[in-house]
Image (cartoon, grey):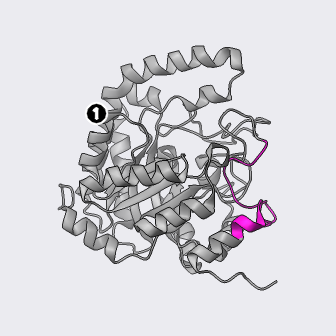
Amino acid sequence: MATVRWTAPRANAWYAEQPWLVGCNFIPSTAINQLEMWQSETFDADTIDRELGWAADLGMNSVRVFLHDLMWDADAAGFAARIDAFLGIASRHGIRTMLVLFDDCWHDGARLGPQPSPVPGRHNSGWLQSPGHAVIAARSSLPRLEAYVTGVVRAFHSDDRVLTWDIYNELTNGFLPAQGLPEGDRAAAYRASLELRAESMPLHLELLDLAFGWARSVDPQQPLTAGLFLPDRELNARLIDGSDIITFHSYEDDTRLATLIGRLRKHDRSLICTEYMARTRGCDFASQLTVFKREGVGCFNWGLVNGKTQTHISWTGKSDRWFHDILHPDGRPYDPEEVRSMREITGTTAPAD
């Protein structure tokens, strides 16, 4: 039973066996959040198949996909079957999947059942934390969270269609919901989120460490990781110490991206950027993909098809240009030249009309 982090040589040898990893953070355009994606009533295999076909046409060979702990509680066998179905669809398109287990981004208080409609003009108005701060603070749910992590990882621990396990996305990032508020309310919401973050950090770090241990107890053949997203030295040290490969987020221009990659090289471990691309923050696919390819760093932009998550709208709600996402729901590109550049850099031939 593996209970320790992979050595750097093992992690780097694993990465050397992979193609250049190019992909996106994927949710079908018909789902507003993780529950709507995975619940049996709304699991949309046809849309997943169609949209992953478009991803492959862009040269993508991987996707990053978020799970949710409540799905395992409600119907472990059914949830595992739907994950298997998703992996099968992706694999038929030549795509492997990074599965995300926990997430502190956006909204607390997840509930099973019908999910809300998108709030007009709001980025990710329905995205859910998993398990959420209230659950973590109560601590009584640790046994069921352990069952979720070990159950999902055990089900797919030797499955070649699973690329990696992303244990925890943006731990204690409670800032984002404030960005969707009116200007006058935003400062107060930021102050409240900073206070909550300071108060909750120890409990979330405890869950991070436990989750790494739970996943490793199943001895998966895939590497484990949890991504860096803030210049927080203490948090980043804990994330790196648990990760077999180093993953990180960057929503900055290509110059800052290259500088960040250079700083992370000192850890002598393989690098994958699991979130990038914010057009209104100086990002574009041509320059960013060029940096990733030159540096041999895997990369997953945020978003594929503009849908119910509305991540084409910026965090602040002001969007003269699309923020994330690449395609309209009918498959048309937001920017045909952007798609042409992506295909050129990934070495992909455009599909015939």
Residue at figure coordinates x 62%, y 61% from the top left: 285
**Is 186 drawn above or below residue 104 in the view shown?**
above
Residue furthest to the front in view is 255
Q: What's the magenta region? A: 320-339
Disc 1 residue type (three-letter)? Glu
Location of residue 49 by image quarter: bottom right
In this view of the protein, can residue 343 be seen by the observer? yes
- Element carrying mark 1: helix
Location of residue 305 by image quarter: bottom right
Image quarter hosting the N terminus:
bottom left
Q: Position of residue 157 (x, y in %)?
A: 34, 66
Please identify the dominant SS of the magenta region. loop
Mark 1 burial class by Cα count in 10 Å: few <14, some 14-19, many 20+: few
Location of residue 268 by image quarter: bottom left
Q: Position of residue 311 (x, y in %)?
A: 68, 46
Task: Decide which of 315, 197 is in the foreground and name it.
Answer: 315
Judge left or right: residue 300 versus residue 46. Answer: left
**Circle 1 residue:** 234
Task: Decide which of 259, 192 is in the foreground and name it.
Answer: 259
Residue at figure coordinates x 61%, y 25% from the top left: 178
Judge left or right: residue 161 versus residue 12. Answer: right
**Is 143 drawn above or below residue 293 in the view shown?**
above
Q: Position of residue 212 (x, y in %)?
A: 28, 49
Q: Position of residue 330 (x, y in %)?
A: 82, 65
Residue at figure coordinates x 74%, y 67% from the top left: 337
**Is 56 drawn above or below residue 272 in the view shown?**
below
Task: Decide which of 6, 252 is in the foreground and name it.
Answer: 252
